[in-house]
Amino acid sequence: MKKLLIPALSVFLSLTACSKERHYLKPTQTPSKKLIVIPRDYKDPTLRPYLVNGVRYYPLPESGGFVQSGKASWYGKEFHGRPTSSGELYDMYKKSAAHKTLPLGTHVKVLNLDNKKEIVVEINDRGPFVKGRIIDLSYAAAREIDLIGPGVSSVKIVALGKEVGELKSPLGREPVVEIKDLNRGEFTVQVGAFKNKQSALMVGERLRVIFPYVEVAVYEDGDKGATYRVRVSRSNSLDKARQIQKRLEDMGFEGAFVVSL
């Protein structure tokens, strides 16, 4: 998010596995499935803002109603066995993914718009930090939706929360989670989430000069404290919401995204 000065943010998330651009393997390259795991304490997901390549990102306190469309890429051998932002070691043979702001541990349905194949993955890393890309899939996840060859494809992602991975059918298969018609419903655009109330109010006042509807709402997350979410506009059309999102991005709010209510 550009052009915003947020006070009292002095500690940034240390990113060990996602500060570089992802690289993918050629389809003929098959790395070893043997992964040496070094025991370590699991780091709880954090909501602290972090800085990569001069851009500050604000992880979301919750994923309810999150939908997003854009480009997906994948990463494999170069990062295999390295720590992710969640503290886990990246295993390219497990179905996981990296996202810039969704809470770590969130399960996400990814629909490949080029071939209509879909998969559920767990967010355990941060990235991709390449303009226009919204999610980086693991090698195994990318292979499921035929992303290995092209390397990049258009996708639609829907956050499912943190419990879907525990659901099993009687036969042990993954549950089928239907993707709703994203072009119908009620939508708003989230500009940002702030720990500092005054920062959220300042952004809200700035936006009220331009938009007729601006909401600054508090979200309480137990012992993690309050987060103040700034949202703009209400519409019953996803296309209209995306137009508002694009307008906000042009104003410098690059972290703006559409939320389905």
Image (cartoon, grey):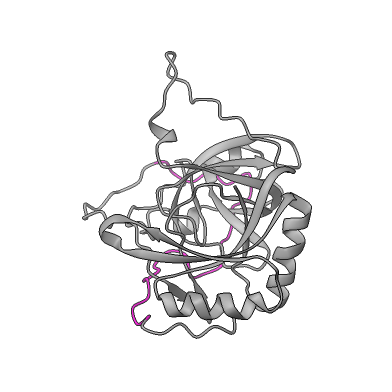
Q: How many marks?
A: 0
Q: Is residue 15 magenta?
A: yes
Q: Residue furthest top?
A: 170
Looking at the rendering, the stretch of residues picked out in magenta corresponds to: 9-33
Residue 190's image quarter?
bottom right
- Name the residue rendered at 66%, 45% in the picture: 147
Q: Residue furthest front?
A: 212
Q: Give 196 or 253, whichever is nearer the viewer.
A: 196
Q: Is residue 32 left or right of residue 184?
A: left
Q: Is residue 77 left or right of residue 260?
A: left
- Name the residue rendered at 57%, 67% in the picture: 129
- Name the residue rendered at 31%, 63% in the picture: 225
Q: Could you tell me which quadrant the N terminus lies in?
A: bottom right
**Visible residue check, residue 1:** no
How far across and how far down the image is residue 66, in percent? 56, 50
How far across and how far down the image is residue 110, in percent? 60, 42
Figure check: 28 above or below 232 = above
Q: Give 77 or 259, whichever is nearer the viewer.
A: 259
Figure check: 58 above or below 158 = below
Figure check: 152 above or below 145 = below
Q: Is residue 68 left or right of residue 98?
A: right
Q: Is residue 104 magenta?
A: no
How far across and how far down the image is residue 218, in percent? 43, 62
**Visible residue check, residue 188:** yes
Q: Give 257 or 41, whichever is nearer the viewer.
A: 257
How far across and how far down the image is residue 186, in percent? 67, 47
Q: Main secondary structure of the magenta part?
A: loop
- Name the residue rendered at 63%, 35% in the picture: 118
